[in-house]
Amino acid sequence: MNEAKKGRRSAAWFSKLDKDGFIHRSWVGRGLPPDVFDGRPIIGICNTWSELTPCNAHFRELADHVKRGVWEAGGLPFEFPVMSTGETSLRPTAMLFRNLVSMDVEESIRGNPIDGVVLLCGCDKTTPSLVMGAASCDAPAIALSGGPMLNGMYRGQPLGSGTDVWRFSEEMRAGRMTSKEFFEAESCMSRSTGVCNVMGTASTMATMIEALGIAFPQNAAIPAVDSRRYAMAHAVGRRIVEMVNQDIRLSKILTRAAFENAIRVNGAVGGSTNAVIHLLAIAGRVGVDVSLDDWDRLGRDVPTIVDLKPSGRFLMEEFYYAGGVPTVMRALDEHGLLHGDAMTVNGRTVTENVSDAPNYNTEVIREFDKPLVASGGIAVLHGNLAPDGAVIKPSAASASLMKHRGRAVVFTSIEDYNARINDPALDVDKDCVLVLQNCGPVGYPGMAEVGNFGLPPKLLKTGVTDMVRISDARMSGTAYGTAVLHVCPEAAVGGPLALVRDGDLIELDVAARRLHLEVDDAELARRRAAWSAPPAPMIGGYVHLYRTHVQQANLGADLDFLRGSRGHAVPRESH
Ligand code: FES
């Protein structure tokens, strides 16, 4: 034991020359030579591996490569599990558990002899939850993503995860695709481990942590099965040891400038609306003041230059081969849209990381002045229907519906929607506005990804492909459509969305950032007086804690008592 290293937090466990030190070393050190407790940095590898999270199924191998780098750099690695949230299986929605996982991560880091941590992130919520938890401890940390799966391939055509499921589902419901073809495509979509291969939420969040500077350049796009992903893991293992030695904590990287960079990169890649909520929540953990309106303001002058599904044509494999996120960031930096001096975890600034990033394919990563969408980003809407804001992703919506006025057809819950949407007698036409209530953080609970709810089959069969949809839900990052999401306050807490009735006229004007319910105040007051909260869909347990404390989407849907950083100090020891 090296007394000189007592300043390191793990020294409180391993440097003690008494019975407690004996216990800490003897139990944890099984299979290790005693001299590893010489004061070297202890590196936690926070692993979200689970067979129930198939996107993260390769994470034990990834962790092994991180360990090689840690050992090589003179650290001592310990891998530990946290709850893993598999997006496609977890009910009622993985988002319900993002905050719970963040608590698991935070307490696992703080309570253990960990000096620095590598966060293994993959499937959608496994990225924000790990970053939120680590940020609340303010430990030295590097996030490492698992990478996207290979391109899906069906009858010679590339298949995008999720995106083409939504498309095929509508095709089948419209009678243009047989169920045999539909199920044939099922086995063609997920050809390897890794996250969804479109710019869905997982790849968006992998892009966001790269843009924030808490992951290495190329973190987002190297395919999960590519050997370069494992070489990166090795390098991350080396670097986290250096970061502990230099005491570079997350709060030194997660600055206001870093969040502004990430918001702009999200616009350039056509990223998921879910990034809005997750970055607001992460910012809340480190005490950086980022608001919903920052998303609108900073994203407005950013063109979407990445031509990836669901906004465009290509998939993550092509994105990596074209140059990946560094190429996009170089274009933004050259046009003065990034804080190039922001520091990143590899010890270099943003500009130093991206200034020589080549573009190998200008069809996939377009030139700045030939964008896919001239004004990308996320539009933030306000009005009497969303006093605290709502969002829409113009690059995934129909240009013809960006200004629209229509008659509301209201569904009071997802069950109500499922029960009536296929009814040929449903009173709906192509100009109607479909409204879905009670799918927000409190209402669902957990703010499910149902905001891109499907169109009525009777309209699909006439060739209608998009309609304005409004809800307090989220939308899968793989999805598309003219979907107004995250309406705040949500219906289940009495937001104006709860007061919409069939036949009301609703005006959407994205250019004016306006979402207006054409019902006068007196009538809204009358409806409000008659409104009562829907019954809790689930009782007790974590759901009770969540529904009691969750904040609205415009604040990141974090639990109120989890905001902020509580640091890594532990006042008492265990024996
Ligand atoms: Fe795991 Fe899409 S379902 S990343």
Image: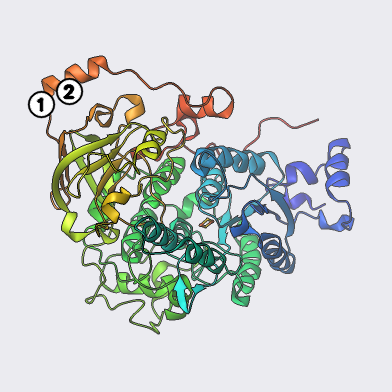
- Can residue 465 be seen here? The reply is yes
SS at mark 1 in the image: loop
Distance from label 1 to label 2 (Cα)?
A: 6 Å
Residue at mark 1: 520
Query: Is residue 439 toward the left or the right of residue 245 in the image?
Result: left
The figure's colour scheme reads rainbow
Residue at the spot x=31%, y=61% of the render? 267
Q: Is residue 116 above or below residue 360?
A: above
Q: From this viewpoint, which residue is outermost toward the top?
A: 529
Q: Is residue 353 visible?
A: no
Residue 75 vertical position relative to residue 46 in the rendered view, above or below: below
In the depicted view, which residue is nearer to us: 326 or 9?
326
Kindly identify which numbered label has been placed on residue 524.
2
Horizontal and vertical percent position of residue 456: 30, 47
Q: Residue furthest bottom?
A: 360
90 or 274, which is in the foreground? 90
- Residue 366, given in percent of the width and then of the height, sits at 30, 77
Residue 343 versus residue 32: which sits nearer the camera? 32
The amino acid type found where label 1 is placed reads Asp
Q: How busy is the neighbourhood of tag 2: few (under 14 within 10 Å), some, or many (20 plus)?
A: some
Name the residue: 48% across, 63% down.
182
Question: Is residue 87 depicted above or below 350 in this figure?
Answer: above
